[in-house]
């Protein structure tokens, strides 16, 4: 059948998750418009590449032109100074939504993060309705973006799927990721489901693979039809061998956000 | 082993779901007593056939005589005028319960409908405890029947399982049914489980197959032991090919009840 | 200031609560249109009187013409045969809503009843979100009417306030009414608040005075601004003197609906 | 007895609420340190006045020196451009918390706003645990500040009381304020209770007077001991006389945030 | 009118609360049977006095003979060694319920304690449905007694009212008691209401006066009709003068149970 | 890799579940310290055996010396007299926790029981947050132990996993066990997961296999990573053949705890 989308904008296309999407979504849209502040490399025929600082609205606005859907994976990807977070994530995400509004884009898929709720205790199983508990300035910017999406839905009827990414790597890198891991294949699946779902309104969903250990209850997003296929358990022995047991009171064991919750203030580290 | 039931009454036995049960339940009861207002065709040795208008109590009362269990699938099966809904579904279901009471039948299995909660938004995952939100006069009559069953349980200790049927067809017929489909095999299973469960009191359960997309959370009915085996996903490509994407604000995409919620008042259509 | 309403329709205007409203609302509307199946007595200048059987749509339809607001207090007021309940309350309430729809009336205030939730145990404090548990055919018809109002709101944007009347008499008549009593003054207040509230959508509120004992939590209706001023406690000594203590397992002590829950099936009584 | 606090910092001290606090808190601290970007007028003996742009961290940092408690009422007080909201409210509030952290201030009282949850429907009674639904960029910045306070509590043990101010004026100015009004006396009371409470952790409380109509359920903040003494009802007749009834579907009637929710995007207005 | 009860058994009648009841209940029963391990002093004509160790079933059993109602206020009243708690409170309360069962007593009113939930944080407002979080061995024995009462209700239909006493003294003795204080008059009222309520099944209610600060939400016990009349606020200034502000992280400020939660294990103290 | 634990103490090691653990855990610890009041048989090289009455603290204390982890499966395993339950389960479990505290053991895994919540109705699906409803003195002692574990976590930071064992036998023995069965293999798995989880705080989890029928919702323990592999359904036909259908009002059908809930008081049986 014909491709569902004419043109999809992917921000952060040079980042770890952006590169996954760049490869995975080529069958879903006639054109992938890619943007990043970092180099995008050679472009294929179905690709458009635009280098852009998301904090600069003048440059962000045209990104949304003639676009069916935005997948917003750009911004500062880990903890950083408030100034960088403010520019890249807070101002940057506002710019994306405002560009979407001005150009009539009707759906945004956003890579939110478990760090928006990183201060919950590991023994608390939470769903997508719990209050924010950011574990970092980075996590705080994810909270802001989720609320921003809510505002654009309530006021301007722009739909959002906020995917709270757990830990998306080739494989689980430590004991915490046995619970939080999201394989690239499952990440792709959840993005595709968010693209194809007939209606999403403003939805929050946890991005995790089918791990035996889970901290998150995804049932309120069941209309999305996301059913992960990979599992961190296949790496359990390897992780157990390479990583000693955690002290239950260490932040890495204690909090959903792991070390992000335990680390002191960013400025203290510099 | 011996058949568990001596005689089961099936109402609406000439209807789409009634025919499924007529075939599927022959091993569970020595006699299936079948009733419908439409012709029932030839009867097998283990079958009794009685033509009956459910709105007529004089005719309904003897249906329940010497019966172990009633499966009430009769009545008006889609939206219709208030008068027909009132007679076939409201009065008709009252007649069935009252006949059960007078003849000492202790359990009724009722084919309720998703249209009893059809006005919930697709992005809301609901369980069986939510308030009614009927999407039609038809759905309203299902709400009435559920409350009626509650009354007969609280006051007369007659048990009920209310199965809120999603979309029970040979296969999913449109994009909405990717979430709401209930295969005939799974329908049979859930009815059998409702028959065999040691205790059901007054229970509401969603009748859906193991679809990837789901709108309904069945966990409060887990004591029933219903685990669907079919899935609408096997038809996903076919449905995607034949049916264009839905506008997220169309009723068919927006509401649990789909087009029922969107349609205007029945009288307006005539 | 000018009266807020041009014409209010009061059904059941010859009944106990209808008479209270007939007197109390004369300052709120230029014309009170009164209807009942029983005689209405002499009419004042600001009154219109129409004798009508609510079960007859042809007669109900014109009642709603040129009306700003309907207060629907008519129908069978206590337990009765299914046939009478069906005609007076189920068909009758449908007729009222349908007449409202056809004539563009935008708000209906309905005297629902505690008997819609009469089978809850006295030791359970419930709010307006709990599932229906009717204690009688009468209570069942109240459940139907509440769901009907929900349908007309969701589909046709007709607002409803469903006031679940406790026990509205001159004074509390037995020990149960120490909890469920609603004075006529407080009944009037809650109706007026329901009339004046800027927006009610589909709201359920308990109609009770400021009794020390309460079974119902009204907090979800706080936007209505109803604050009762009378209290059953002023009658406590009198009631204690005249009525012996209840056995905690008698229906009158056990259930929200009191004796309605305990009584057997109506037909058994005849 | 001796004053409980040595030095309290009040931001936004030249604003409407800041002026109320400047007058009201003089008995609670030996020194009130006042700051605003606008002129503060003559200073009393117990006052220190510092003109400061909250967006400038270099100037904000010394504000928190030798301070026992911060009452943060500064920033942009109504809807404005994203740029001004970003600087005054997002960056500004971060600067306040960061200054508190660096100077060891242990409690911040923040004038949050109903506009953080302004898109809830008037017929929904909400408590302080519901998800954010900002109705404006202004409301969005209040959401950010609440999450920021949560972060500083979870990570740095700085306590916060977030007072979601309803409508704090001399008297209720329109029909919506019959529900949302907060008198200056009650505002003062809630701030004092937030100052004196032995422990607040990170608390959200609604700032409303004892209005008959209420949209907000404050029970989760009952440990604060705030019991409002004024009521909008004393102004009910006056408001009814001066303001016509609202259409139930107008934003002013429909949403907690009133006209903020209804207004289009700020940029559209310029 | 005649006294409602023939004979009420009060355990712990020589204790602080027992003495209050001995005086207050003389008008409610023809005979008060008083028991304690400590001397009871002179007996009035309407009193029977029996010295008894509650841990000794042979002596406890006859206490319940010919009794209408038991008010069980006996046992170890503060933290103590496990051995004493086990004998006086765990075994002792079992003996009381078992004696009630053997002699057909149908209702027990028990002075439970806030220390059954003493480890909740002061900023959490809890109701009677929350899980136990005992702050001491004493509190643990109160949890046991509440569960024991549940068992005797579910299995033997013996009703219980568990009153979680806050701090019942002549007046509030420290800052924490501004929230937890229960005046003797209010204590008497709640006991009388528990005696007179038509049905209590197994109910948990918080025993607190009408204090401005509250940690507990009593709405689930509203059928009891308890409305406190005293308030700790009348002592607020006196308490503030005599007691310095608390550190928010001290146990006395932090936990519902106050110092009980902060103290180390009992054995450590000996 | 090296064994995770140096020495694990297993109480009740001669009991049905204790013997399963004795065999299953030999690969997880260098030494298994086994204790029971019954004979333990021959000891393997990696085993230490100590005969001990758990009610005797002097003998229990040294059991916890040099131990990494305690698995407490000892005590009276079914309904018995209060005296035996008090000694073996209440005093016994206190002794275990107190020994753990004195010797610095940081985690206890406890075989709690469904009989702690045995009075819930079969048609109620419950999770681990519901209030206790013990069905027996045995179940009551399990409630006590769960609350005791909560106390030792809140006050002394000793972690607990309370596994509410359903019915752990070789195979399901009756119709009720189709829902409650826990295979020995799954029992072993859940214990191992409780041993290896990085942090458990105070957790309650239901111990059941992957049965089609379930009464319990384990989602709040999802961080444990327990995914049962066996299912009672493989025995369904056999059970159906050997056991007739249950009356829905018999205790065995009605309550989570089955016959325990139905049986009268223990003393009545002797």
Image (tube, coloured by chain):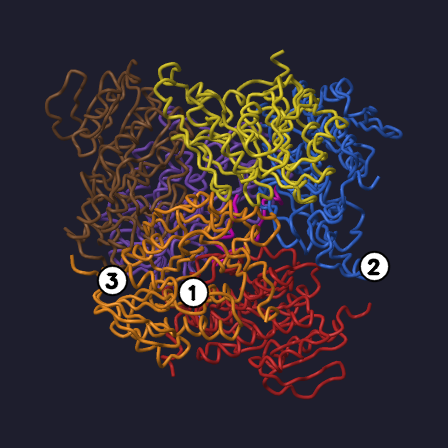
Chain colours: A orange, B brown, C purple, D red, E blue, F yellow
The span shown in magenta is C216-235
Q: Which mark is residue E242?
A: 2
Q: Position of residue B253 (x, y in %)?
A: 26, 54
| Disc 2 and disc 1 on one polypeptide chain | no
Q: Per the image, is F256 magenta?
A: no
In this view, the residue in front, D37 or E150, is D37
Secondary element at tag 3: helix
Q: Using the rendered image, report if marks 3 and 1 lie on a common chain.
A: no
Apparent side of residue E13 relative to residue C119 in the rendered image (left or right): right
User: Closer to us: mark 3 or mark 2?
Assistant: 3
Q: Residue at (41%, 25%) from the top-left corner? A: F178
How many labels sit on residues? 3
The chain letter for the residue carrying disc 2 is E
Q: Secondary structure at mark 2?
A: helix
Say few, some or many: other residues with alpha carbon within 10 Å of mark 1 (under 14 / 14 to 19 / 20 or more): many
Q: CA distance from mark 3 to mark 1?
A: 42 Å
Q: Mark 2 or mark 1, which is nearer to you? A: 2
Quarter of the N terminus of chain C within the rendering: bottom left
Circle 3 residue: A26
What is the number of the mark on residue D255? Answer: 1
Q: Are dots 3 and 1 in contact, CB under 8 Å?
A: no
């Amino acid at each position: 059948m014909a491709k569902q989308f004419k043109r999809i904008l992917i921000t952060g296309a040079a980042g770890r998750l952006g590169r996954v999407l760049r490869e995975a979504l080529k069958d879903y849209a006639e054109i992938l418009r890619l943007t990043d502040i970092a180099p995008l490399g050679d472009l294929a025929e179905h690709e458009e590449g635009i280098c852009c600082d998301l904090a600069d609205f003048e440059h962000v606005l045209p990104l949304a032109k003639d676009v069916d859907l935005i997948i917003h994976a750009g911004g500062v990807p880990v903890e950083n100074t408030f100034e960088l977070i403010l520019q890249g994530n807070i101002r940057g995400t506002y710019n994306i939504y405002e560009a979407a509004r001005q150009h009539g884009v009707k759906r945004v898929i956003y890579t939110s993060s478990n760090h928006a709720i990183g201060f919950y205790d590991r023994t608390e199983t939470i769903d997508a309705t719990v209050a924010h508990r950011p574990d970092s300035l980075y996590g705080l910017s994810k909270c802001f973006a989720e609320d921003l999406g809510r505002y654009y839905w309530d006021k301007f009827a722009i739909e959002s799927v906020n995917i709270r990414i757990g830990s998306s790597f080739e494989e689980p890198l430590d004991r915490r990721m046995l619970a939080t891991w999201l394989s690239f294949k499952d990440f792709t699946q959840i993005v595709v489901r968010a693209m194809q779902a007939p209606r999403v309104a403003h939805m929050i969903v946890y991005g995790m693979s089918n791990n035996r250990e889970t901290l998150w209850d995804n049932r309120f997003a069941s209309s999305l039809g996301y059913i992960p296929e990979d599992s961190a358990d296949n790496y359990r022995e390897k992780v157990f061998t390479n990583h000693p047991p955690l002290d239950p009171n260490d932040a890495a064991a204690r909090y959903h956000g792991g070390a992000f919750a335990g680390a002191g203030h960013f400025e203290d580290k510099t």
